[in-house]
Amino acid sequence: MPPELLSAPRRQGSVLFTVLLALAMLIGAGIMALVLLASSAPGGLVIGVLLAALPVGPVIAAFLWLDRYEPEPLRLLGAAFGWGAVVATAAALVLQALDQFILGTPETWSAAIVAPITEEAAKGLFILLLLWMRRHEIDGVLDGIVYAGMVGVGFAFTENILYLAAAYMGGDDVGPGGLGSAVGVFVVRGIFSPFAHPLFTAFIGVGVGYAVVSRRGATRLVAPLVGYVLAVTAHAAWNGSAFFGGGRYFVLTYIVMMVPAFLLLAGFATWARRREGVMLTRALTDAAGRGFLSQAEVPWLVRLPARRASRAYALAHGGPQAERAMREYQQQAVELGFLHDRYLRGTAPADFAERGTFMVRRLDALRPYVLFPQPVATSTTTPWEGSR
């Protein structure tokens, strides 16, 4: 199989996006390295990193589970995590330091008001950059949640390192120190609230995702702003419960607000994931009716167990290259399904015909190398214009 069929061409704006991302990562990593080295001894950092890393895997796994119908590129998911871990944390720290230097905001108000405003803005900026420079990567609300969640996981990881290392080292404000103190902080931040930052930023992801699929120009502008306001509000309520009233409202806020909000968002994300399956079936069935692919292929492209079975069949009967071809074919077909659905709903992007034509031609080029578990009719190569 020709190697060029195994990778899609680089899209316009990718180079600029990569350069901006690399510069931001480099600057953010430098700032956070200085902060981490200055805030704790090596022993405290080691304990902080080890404990902070424990909840990262399960939380990321939850977002990857949501992202199974149209898996986002791992490099972009990694970039989202890195943005949260070094860029957003560094930007928020710089902005909060400026607030202390210029305005002298009291610590409690800084934690409850300034921190949510700056941190959610710094985290949400990555989603806005995607929307601006890599808009084709966000097809709807679920994509927004996944990217926002990954940014939140990265931010929580670095923030937890700082808190856990400080607890281990001890001090006037954090107690006697030692492993016991660090474990106590870990229980609160790593066990009871590992989804806190991903939850807050997910509101921005919902707003951006809704803006992408909306037909109304006003909604496309307002939805991300509403998402940001909700993220800041939830974040401020969470922080405020720990700093005001001696922290006696913290548990109440956790039970009354955080747990229901998490369950609500988790339920919504699960519903959106299930809805994607229904949408893909409808869109690809319509695309098959227009001759863009075979009708018999649709079940093998939509149902997740069927996808796994077809990849296993390709591997068993054609080897690793056939399995890779099947994986690429499935991914390209799913991307076509999302694009075609936007056409059917009247929210197709300006370049939808060009992108759709490329997707159909790439499917036709990959099809001779694809082994389905049962004979599948061959479609006729046709230009994709979305209007037939």
Image (cartoon, helix red, strand yellow):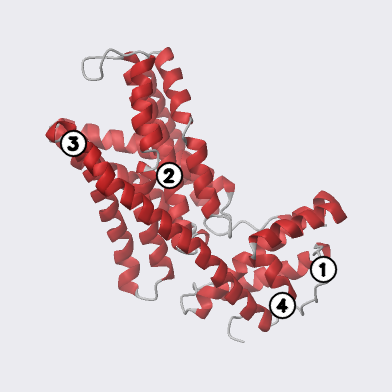
Residue 180 versus residue 320 in the image, above or below: above
- N-terminal label among 1 and 3: 3
Residue ID for mark 3: 110
Distance Cα–Cα, label 1 vs label 3 = 62 Å
Nearer the camera: disc 2 or disc 4: 4
- N-terminal label among 4 and 1: 4
Q: Residue at x 50, y 67 (%)?
A: 275
Secondary structure beneath disc 2? helix
- N-terminal label among 1 and 2: 2
Nearer the camera: disc 1 or disc 2: 1
Residue 79 numbered mark, or none: none
Q: Residue at x 69, y 77 (%)?
A: 292
Nearer the camera: disc 1 or disc 3: 1
User: Where residue 166 sits: x, y (%)?
Assistant: 32, 20
Residue ID for mark 1: 374
Amino acid type at mark 2:
Val
Left or right: where does residue 348 sit relative to residue 360?
left
Distance Cα–Cα, label 3 vs label 2 = 22 Å
Residue nearest the viewer, comparing 250 with 104? 250
Residue 295 numbered mark, or none: 4
Rendering quarter of residue 160:
top left
Rendering quarter of residue 178:
top left
Residue ID for mark 2: 151
What quarter of the picture does the N terminus occupy? Answer: bottom right
Secondary structure beneath disc 4? helix
- N-terminal label among 4 and 3: 3
Amino acid type at mark 4:
Gln
Nearer the camera: disc 4 or disc 3: 4
Nearer the camera: disc 4 or disc 1: 1
Rendering quarter of residue 372:
bottom right
